[in-house]
């Protein structure tokens, strides 16, 4: 059934208006040239060196021009299951952008959404600050009918993604993969596939304060029927929108998807016996962290958040919102095998994709959970060993001890970092050249994937840009070198936690 309501325009709410406003984009204020209507024709193309004036620092290759159009459309997530949503270039997930390391990316974004501005954030890439796509911090929103050109060097190589960073637009389908191919991979493979994990919302997203009000009304209706404390500690249903214990609120997702397909009609990927396959696992989900395993096979992790690590064989891994892992699979066990992504929080059916060997055309896929989700070795951050030079282990020049809190019974729609809520929180001030340590403790009942814009940071012996802080007093620390001046957002990549205040700004002074 086509959900026409989801095609209705989303207007900026009070929170978004207070934060950002929707002002006419000023190209001169940003120092960014805007192309005319004939500058992009909707196709990717290479541009020779003779057309590379004012090359951004770090770009050594040709220019790649890309056009993205944010627009209304329909998406089929299963046979006959069609919803209206928001799309990039009419696709969900959005079109894969693939370039070679060192090329210059020049991406024109056209906003054809009605009555709302938009931006695009290039998640994980340490690009110039004006290109980061954060409304109210690095740019004004692109107004309806307007355009903006994002122009930056495609470096370093890795698996990244792009998505809207305005309000709750990420949960309207405005996401896509961005791949920067390395010049010389440190692992051998014969072919690769990109897998994008997402939780699909059929309607316009609502902020936590509205979801909490719905959950509260449902709870009052249940308290008289359930007896005991069941009404207090198990407030949920299959479509979400209810309290999950006291930990948080889940939007009413249709289901969990891989490459835009529900588990009832999964995407299929081809394997040939004897080959090595690289899988790029990318999680732009708004509110879901996954436990992932591939039945019948081990997974060798080769990259974390795009950065190369010493290969490590595991049976499963945790993929938080905003995280990416590249894995190598040895195709040595013919058949049809499911890759299963089970949610860490909540009880939604797991997302699934199928890997079918070329000689198993008539073979039925295996049922049930892969053994890796029932036991075996799960990847931990301590398993990641970078093959790159890491920031030196020395005393930090500046340290921030930050407590992550929120989701309490009386105020489930408030989430804080260091007791402060964005956008009213004071900036965390740093100076160029400093080694900055961020130590986090999680006082809440939900995990938090914390993402830093514009930088990679050191966790243990690896470089990442997103790290999970476990629930119930979980603790973790990371170090980063302040080498990219500007104003950079640091936030929980659970979209609803960020929108409810769980963000801070690192500001160079």
Image (cartoon, helix red, strand yellow):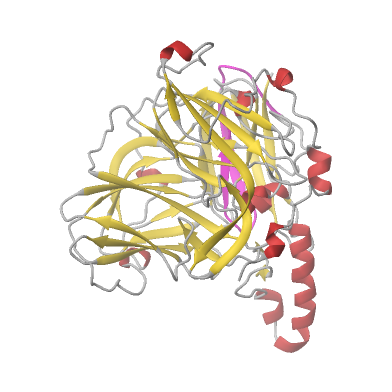
Q: Is residue 204 visible?
A: yes
Q: Residue furthest front?
A: 38
**Residue 20 placement, left or right of 98:** right
Percent x, y of residue 90: 56, 49
Is residue 236 shown in magenta?
A: no
Q: Residue furthest left?
A: 274
- Residue 432 lies in the magenta stretch: yes
Q: Position of residue 438 (x, y in %)?
A: 58, 35
Q: Residue at x 59, y 17 (%)?
A: 432
Locate residue 120: give its quadrant.
Answer: top right
Magenta span of residues = 428-454
Relative placement, left or right, of 292 versus 213 is: left
Q: Position of residue 211 (x, y in %)?
A: 74, 63
Q: Give the residue at x 53% y 23%.
A: 152
Could you tell me which quadrant the N terminus lies in? Answer: bottom right
Tell me the residue at 71%/48% (across/down): 499
In this picture, is 402 found above or below 227? above
Q: Does residue 230 appear left or right of residue 361 in this picture?
A: right
Q: Residue 21 at x, y = what percent?
A: 81, 37
**Residue depicted at 30% across the width and 72% down the height:** 366
Q: Quadrant of the C terminus?
A: top right
Near-viewer residue (114 or 482) = 114
Residue closer to the observer: 434 or 194? 194
Location of residue 300 with respect to 77 vertically, above or below: above
Residue 454 can be seen in this image: no
Looking at the rendered structure, the number of numbered marks drawn on it comes to 0
């Amino acid at each position: 059934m086509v959900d026409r309501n989801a095609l209705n325009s989303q207007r900026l709410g009070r929170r978004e208006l207070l934060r950002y406003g929707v002002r006419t984009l000023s190209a001169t204020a940003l120092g960014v040239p805007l192309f005319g209507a004939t500058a992009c024709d909707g196709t990717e193309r290479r541009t020779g060196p003779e057309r590379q004036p004012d090359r951004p620092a770090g770009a050594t290759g040709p220019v790649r021009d890309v056009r993205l159009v944010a627009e209304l459309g329909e998406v089929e997530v299963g046979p006959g299951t069609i919803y209206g949503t928001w799309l990039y270039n009419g696709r969900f997930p959005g079109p894969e952008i693939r370039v070679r390391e060192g090329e210059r990316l020049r991406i024109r974004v056209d906003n054809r959404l009605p009555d709302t501005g938009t931006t695009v954030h290039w998640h994980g890439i340490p690009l110039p600050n004006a290109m980061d796509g954060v409304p109210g911090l690095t740019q004004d929103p692109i107004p309806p009918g307007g355009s903006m050109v994002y122009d930056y060097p495609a470096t370093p190589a890795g698996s990244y993604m792009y998505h809207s960073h305005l309000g709750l637009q990420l949960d309207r389908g405005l996401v896509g993969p961005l791949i920067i191919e390395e010049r010389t991979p440190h692992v051998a493979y014969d072919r690769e596939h990109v897998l994008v994990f997402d939780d699909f919302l059929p309607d316009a997203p609502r902020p936590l304060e509205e979801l909490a009000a719905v959950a509260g009304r449902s709870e009052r209706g249940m308290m008289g029927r359930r007896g005991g404390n069941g009404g207090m500690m198990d407030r949920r249903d299959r479509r979400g929108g209810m309290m999950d214990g006291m930990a948080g609120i889940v939007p009413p997702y249709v289901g969990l998807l891989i490459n835009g397909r529900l588990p009832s009609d999964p995407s299929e990927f081809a394997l040939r016996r004897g080959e090595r396959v690289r899988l790029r696992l990318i999680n732009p989900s708004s509110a879901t962290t996954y436990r992932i395993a591939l039945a019948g096979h081990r997974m060798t992790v080769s990259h974390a958040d795009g950065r190369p690590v010493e290969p490590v064989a595991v049976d499963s891994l945790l993929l938080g919102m905003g995280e990416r892992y590249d894995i190598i699979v040895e195709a040595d066990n013919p058949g049809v095998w499911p890759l299963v992504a089970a949610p860490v929080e909540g009880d939604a059916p797991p997302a699934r994709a199928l890997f079918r060997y070329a000689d198993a055309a008539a073979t039925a896929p295996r049922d049930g959970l892969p053994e890796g989700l029932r036991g075996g070795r799960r990847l931990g951050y301590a398993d990641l060993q970078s093959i790159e030079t890491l920031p030196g282990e020395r005393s930090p020049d500046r340290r921030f001890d930050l407590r992550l809190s929120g989701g309490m019974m009386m105020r489930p729609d408030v989430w804080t970092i260091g007791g402060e809520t964005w956008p009213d929180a004071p900036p965390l001030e740093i100076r160029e050249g400093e080694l900055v340590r961020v130590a986090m403790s999680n006082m809440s009942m939900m995990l938090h994937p914390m993402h830093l814009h514009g930088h990679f940071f050191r966790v243990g012996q690896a470089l990442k840009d997103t790290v999970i802080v476990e629930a119930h007093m979980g603790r973790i620390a990371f170090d980063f070198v302040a080498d990219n001046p500007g104003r950079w957002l640091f936030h929980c990549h659970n979209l609803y936690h960020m929108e409810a205040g769980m963000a801070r700004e690192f500001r160079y002074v």
